[in-house]
Image (cartoon, helix red, strand yellow):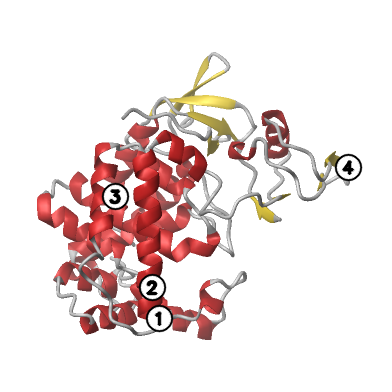
Amino acid sequence: MKYVKPYMGLVKQQLADDIITEQGLLLLSKGHILTEEDIKAIIIRQIDRIAIEETRTSINEYMNHLQKMDPEFYQLYDTCLTTVEDLFQSASRQERIEQDTLFEIFDDLMSHMVSVPHLFIQLRTIKDIDHYTMQHSINVGIISALLARLMGLKGDEVIRIGHAGFLHDIGKALIPSSILQKPIVLTDVEFETVKKHPRLGYEILVKNEIKDPLVLTAALMHHERLNGKGYPLKKDGTNIPLVAQIVAIADVYDAISSERVYKKSFSPFHAYMELHQIAFQGELNAAIVLNFLQYISKLMEGQEVIMNDGQKATVILADPSEPHRPLVSMSGQFIDLRKERNRYIQELLIPMKYET
């Protein structure tokens, strides 16, 4: 049994416990197989968590769909995940990291992602709490490479920035899993332990003779913030190298989008809003963030979504100034979410449609 946020991808899943409304009424019984209408009813009642039977042990319930939709992507991602798990295990045992094949499979995955842009959106569906740090490393590497491309960087520099994102969290291999997986708020002492991971990561890379300055800089400085409130060096503004600014954005975006032991995941559009707010509060490079959000939002056009009232809608057009509040079509009407502030997109309908 596992507890999950209600979303349309749970159609045909079996309930592991009764769903009771705030009024104490039985909505659905344990053992019930969920339908689309059931999930709409759950969302409308703003039920935050439901219990479903765990029927799979692979990295998440979407991987079967992804395997059929894009077998090459599935194979590359799965192989890359195994590579990252081996990498973190070696680092945790302070064994030597094998560099020869370290980036090879990641580079293949990154190249495939570039050829099928809509797969950037699918990254958020490949989430499993138990594999979070490993999946996060892959995703941040891919998103970092995308950000570099969107900035007009080319060739080897894009690849190196992808590598920087890929290895940014290697220091967490030396942080106790009891802290990383803790389901409640960390104590001050525990948080100070987590904050050691940038320096630890830098030291791991240096010890293993990984000499690319972009990779080293990202590991050490991806938690620095433009307003000087980051760590560990408390750098600010232009004192933070571009690669660290890029990886920081990728890191924050993927973290916001992800299910964690201590928080639920956000829909892509909610994640856009959060990232937009963080950037314009002075923590992240706002120009890079806005460029990224505009690009990703354009990929969403034509996708079916679920609104906060449980109704289906289709994304028609993303506005550059507020990419998280697009124009949608619902029940034959166009609705501008910039004007109707009480409406918002709750979740994407999975599977997404995309062109190869």
88, 216: nearer the viewer: 88
Q: Position of residue 166 (x, y in %)?
A: 30, 62
In front: label 4 or label 3: 3
50, 30: nearer the viewer: 30
The residue lying furthest to the top in this view is: 332
Label 4 to label 3: alpha-carbon separation: 48 Å
Q: Which residue is mark 2?
A: 88
Going by the image, does 282 lie left or right of 6?
left
* Residue 354 visible (yes or no): yes
Q: Earlier in the sequence, mark 1 or mark 3?
A: 1
For label 3, the SS is helix
Q: Which residue is mark 1?
A: 92
- The kind of residue on which mark 3 rests is Leu
- Compared to residue 273, the image places residue 91 above or below, namely below
For label 4, the SS is loop
Q: Which residue is mark 4?
A: 25
* Mark 3 burial class by Cα count in 10 Å: few <14, some 14-19, many 20+: many
Q: Earlier in the sequence, mark 1 or mark 4?
A: 4
* Mark 2 burial class by Cα count in 10 Å: few <14, some 14-19, many 20+: many
- The kind of residue on which mark 2 rests is Phe
Name the residue: 70% across, 43% down: 46
Label 1 to label 3: alpha-carbon separation: 25 Å
Image quadrant occupied by the C terminus: top left
Name the residue: 58% across, 38% down: 9
Name the residue: 53% across, 25% down: 313
Q: Position of residue 15 (x, y in %)?
A: 75, 45
- The kind of residue on which mark 4 rests is Leu
Name the residue: 37% across, 51% down: 77
Image quadrant occupied by the N terminus: bottom right
Asked whether the beta carbons under mark 1 and mark 4 sit within 8 Å of each other, the answer is: no
Q: Position of residue 177 (x, y in %)?
A: 52, 76
